[in-house]
Amino acid sequence: MTSIPLRVGPSRLKDVALALLAVPLLGVVLPFAVFYLTVCLGSGAGSGDDGDGRIWAFLGIGMIAAPVAALVASVVVAVRSRRSGYQFLTVTAALSPFLVPAVLSSGILWR
């Protein structure tokens, strides 16, 4: 009789470590970086404040692009990690764009 392995894929420790790393990266760092990059493109050299409202357009685009980038990245990470055999990383990647704003807006950290 041949022995059947119980778990094929990444170890639990690696899965948990990557899941804990995915929460701040997908929920905070990526949206902030996309927003900051978009606003920097709008307020680059030669774009003085001449009252044309150009920076407001880039602020609006950045406010829309940041959560969209976080959602797309989380879906990509969730699908790819599910195919690779990760369990915790899949769930964490899917929840992190929603989990971090919910925790920050709930006031739990400031009680």
Image (cartoon, rainbow, N blue to C red):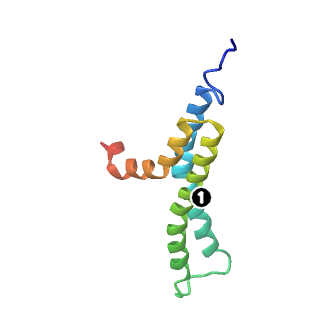
Disc 1 secondary structure class: helix
Q: Residue at x 67, y 81 (%)?
A: 46
Q: Is residue 57 above or below residue 34?
A: below
The quarter holding residue 33 reads bottom right
Q: Residue at x 59, y 62 (%)?
A: 34
Given residues 2 and 82, the one toward you in this image is 2
Q: Which residue is mark 1?
A: 33
**Is residue 43 at least partly visible in the picture?**
no
Q: In the rendered image, which quarter contains the N terminus? A: top right
Amino acid marked by disc 1? Ala
Q: In the rendered image, which quarter contains the C terminus? A: top left
**Is residue 49 at least partly visible in the picture?**
yes
The quarter holding residue 90 reads top right
Q: Residue at x 55, y 35 (%)?
A: 87
Given residues 79 and 34, the one toward you in this image is 79
Specify the farthest residue to the left.
Answer: 111
Residue 69: x percent and y percent? Answer: 57, 60
Residue 78 as seen in the image, left or right of residue 105: right
Residue 36: x percent and y percent? Answer: 58, 63
Specify the farthest residue to the front.
Answer: 1
Residue 95 as seen in the image, left or right of residue 21: left
Residue 105 as seen in the image, left or right of residue 7: left
Given residues 78 and 102, the one toward you in this image is 78
Residue 92: x percent and y percent? Answer: 51, 42
Residue 27: x percent and y percent? Answer: 51, 50
